[in-house]
Amino acid sequence: MMDFLRKVGDVFLDFTETLVIGLSIFLVVYLFFVQPHQVNGQSMVPNFQNGEYVLTNKFGYRVGEPKRGDVVVFHAPPSAHCPKGTGCDFIKRVIALPGETLEVKNCHYYINGRQLPEPYIPVDFCTEPGDFTRNGPVTMGANEYFVSGDNRPYSSDSRAWGPVTPNEIVGKVFFVYWPLDAAGLLEHPQYPF
C-alpha cells in the first residue's frame, strides 16, 4: 500500500512541477513577448473583422521602431471616451512616422506632399479629415505616429484625436489566430517611400 501511495505522490508531484513550469513559461511570454487581443468594432474592416483574435508582438518595438503600414495595438487616448476602468486598447495602422507631414485631401492621405498608396483598402473608401487634420497639413513630432483604421468612414483614429507615442503602443499585430478560416501571418504592405 505504501508503494502505491508513494507512486501516486510521485505522479502528483511530477504533474504539479510540469504545471508550474508551463504556467511560468506562459506568464513570461505573455508579459514580455506576445499578447492576444480581440478586435472590437468595425474600424479595421475589410482586413480585420469584429471578434477576430490576434497576437501582438510586445518585444519588437523595444529593439526597433514602428514602420509605416504596421498594424499596432495601443492604449486608447482619453479623448476616445472609453468606459472608465476598461483600459481599452485600439487596433490601427501606422500611416505617418515621426517628423513627417501628413495631409488629408481628395479622399487620401498625403505624406510629405505625396499621395500614400493603400492597396489594402477598397477604392471606394474615402478618407475624410477629422478635428485634428481639418485645418491642413500636420507635422508629427519627434516621437509621434499617426494611426488610422482601414475602414475610414467608420474609424475613430488620429484624424480625430491626434498622434500616438511609443509609450502608448502595446505592440505590433503579426498573426490572426481566430477564427481559423482567417488565421495566418499578416503581410506588410510595400510603399514607394
Image (cartoon, rainbow, N blue to C red):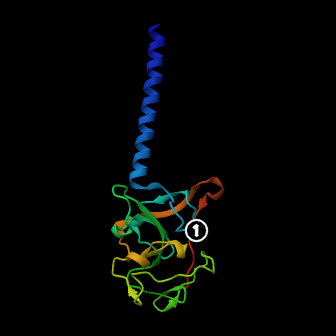
x%, y% of residue 89?
42, 61
Q: Quick one: which residue is furthest to the right in this view?
A: 181
Amino acid tagged 1 = Val
Please tell me whether mark 1 sits on a helix, a strand or a loop: loop
Which residue appears at 45% of the width and 72% of the height? 156
Q: Residue at x 44, y 15 (%)?
A: 6
Residue 183 horizontal side relative to residue 83, left or right? right
**Residue at the extreme bottom of the image, as rendered:** 113
Nearest the eye: 2 or 166? 166
x, y percent for residue 184 = 61, 59
114 left or right of 140? Answer: right
Residue 137 location, quadrant: bottom left
Foreground: 52 or 129? 129
User: Is residue 8 visible from the viewing direction of this image?
Assistant: yes
**Residue 145 in view here:** no
- Left of 49 or right of it: where is 19? left
Q: Quadrant of residue 59?
A: bottom left
Residue density around tag 1, few if under 14, some if 14–19, many if 20 or more, within 10 Å: some
The residue at which mark 1 appears reads as 45
- Residue in front for this viewpoint, 109 or 133: 133
